[in-house]
Image (cartoon, rainbow, N blue to C red):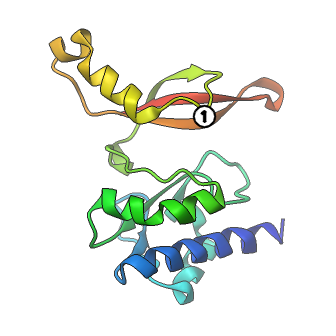
Amino acid sequence: MAQRKPLLLRQLGDLLEAGGLHDPTFSILGWDSRLKTEPILCKKTLRLAQTAIRVYLDTRQRNIVQLTGELQVFSSIVPLDMIAALAAWGKQQDYTIFWSPCQANEKDNIGMLIRSTNAINISYLEKAIRCHPLYVSSGGFIFGLNMSNFTGAKNETARCLMVVV
């Protein structure tokens, strides 16, 4: 396990570097905005994550091995433009980078579609849900969709599409 944390810290450092190429104010914030957590501004301040990684990374990993989960970042660039700027880097790292419509301290998973595949176009599915008569007639609500792994009994995993509100 001693070698796992350096990998995670290197991945966080790489993200900071990639974000900083497009926006010098890019930083990683604490996951829970209600806490007064010092942001990670550069590779020198990665020490903040070394002792309290769960403050910065929301993940279901028991032993955090890699940068898998959700981060809250700051950027002076419009979120969708920053996501587009990080798209090439994310693809090289095999990361899915997306803007979550739900705030970290208000987020709940309310449902999932088990055995989903990466072939699902999440943005088209969100648009279809928002246009569905039942969604429209109920007044709608803010939600997001997130592809993730679901771990069941005996450590069996299945891809699932999670509904996040």
Q: Residue at x 69, y 60 (%)?
A: 66
Residue 40 drawn at (x, y percent): 47, 78
Quadrant location, the C terminus: top left
Q: Residue at x 43, y 59 (%)?
A: 31
The one nearer the camera, 91 or 70, is 91
Can I make out residue 38 in this image? no
Q: Quadrant of residue 113?
A: top right
Q: Locate residue 139 relative to residue 11 in the image: left or right.
A: left
Left or right: 33, with 152 as reference point? left
Relative to 109, is 75 above or below? Answer: below
Residue position marked by numbered label 1 in the rendering: 118
Q: Is residue 140 left or right of residue 144?
A: left
Q: Is residue 99 above or below residue 66?
A: above
Residue 41 position within the rendered picture, expressed as x and y whole percent measured from the top left: 44, 82
As drawn, the residue found furthest toward the bottom would be: 44
The amino acid sitting under disc 1 is Asn
Is residue 153 found left or right of 130 in the rendered image? right
Q: Could you tell me which quadrant the N terminus lies in?
A: bottom right
Q: How many marks?
A: 1
User: Residue at 70% across / 49% down in the picture?
Assistant: 62
40 up-or-down from 98: above or below: below
- Position of residue 154 relative to residue 20, above or below, is above
| Residue in the image at 26% along x and 63% along y | 78
Q: Is residue 5 visible?
A: yes
Q: Position of residue 36 (x, y in %)?
A: 35, 70
Secondary structure beneath label 1: loop
Crowding near the residue tagged with mark 1, few <14, some 14–19, many ≥20 C-alpha atoms within 10 Å: few
